[in-house]
Image (tube, grey):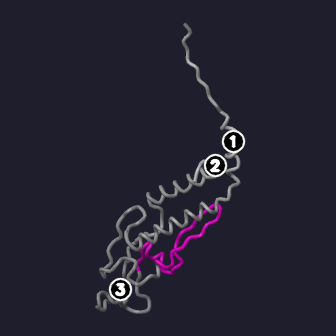
């Protein structure tokens, strides 16, 4: 009685798969990068409008006026969120001149007067300086990373002939 194990490997599909792989370096990746930019713009706007958290999930510090954080002065920041993409990179950010203050935080001191003067809750307030805490709104969250991975996987699968 002859007992043994027989293993067969069918590589007939391997040749076409390898051919597809060799062409991946010539793909136009700008559509993928644009999809990534659109996703990151969406999540950045969502942070500003509703979640009020940094990309790492940390809640933003409250403001002294008790108003909606990063929305109190109108839609300046929200309206300035945009993305650009090329075949090799995606950039998401804000062109509003004060966006960096909110992203990174800043201490603002009086320059041409003894005090800064501003309204809080209908009351005039005078301070020598004001510290605006960082409220990061641009960045990639864990959910964004998952979505970007899904976009890239679908993109590659499509170009290998195996996907949507």
Disc 2 element: loop
Q: Badges 2 and 3: C-beta atoms under 8 Å apart?
A: no
Earlier along the polypeptide chain: callout 1 or callout 2?
1
Q: Badges 1 and 2: C-beta atoms under 8 Å apart?
A: yes
Q: On the image, numbered disc 1 is attached to which residue?
A: 16
Q: Quadrant of residue 115?
A: bottom left
Disc 3 element: loop
Check if residue 16 falls in the magenta segment: no
Residue under the image location 33 percent in, 71 percent down: 61
The magenta segment is 78-107
Q: On the image, numbered disc 3 is attached to which residue?
A: 128
Q: Is residue 153 left or right of residue 125?
A: right
Image location of residue 152, percent across then percent down: 56, 55
Q: On the image, numbered disc 2 is attached to which residue?
A: 161
| Residue lying at the far top of the rendered structure | 1
Number of callouts: 3
Disc 1 to disc 3, C-alpha distance: 70 Å
Tag nearer the camera, 1 or 3? 1
Relative vertical location of residue 155 with respect to residue 47 in this rendering, above or below: above
Disc 2 to disc 3, C-alpha distance: 64 Å
């Amino acid at each position: 009685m002859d007992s043994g194990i027989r293993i067969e490997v069918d590589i007939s599909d391997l040749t076409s798969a390898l051919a597809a792989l060799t062409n991946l370096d010539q793909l136009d990746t700008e559509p993928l990068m644009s999809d990534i930019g659109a996703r990151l713009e969406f999540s950045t706007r969502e942070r500003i409008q509703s979640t009020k958290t940094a990309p790492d999930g940390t809640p933003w510090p409250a403001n002294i006026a008790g108003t909606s954080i990063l929305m109190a002065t109108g839609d300046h920041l929200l309206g300035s969120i945009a993305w650009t993409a090329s075949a090799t990179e995606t950039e998401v950010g804000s062109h509003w001149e004060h966006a960096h203050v909110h992203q990174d935080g800043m201490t603002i001191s009086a320059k041409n007067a003894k005090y800064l003067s501003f309204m809080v809750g209908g009351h005039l307030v005078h301070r020598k300086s004001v510290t605006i805490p960082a409220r990061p709104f641009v960045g990639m969250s864990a959910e964004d990373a998952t979505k970007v991975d899904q976009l890239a996987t679908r993109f590659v699968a499509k170009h290998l002939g195996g996907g949507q």
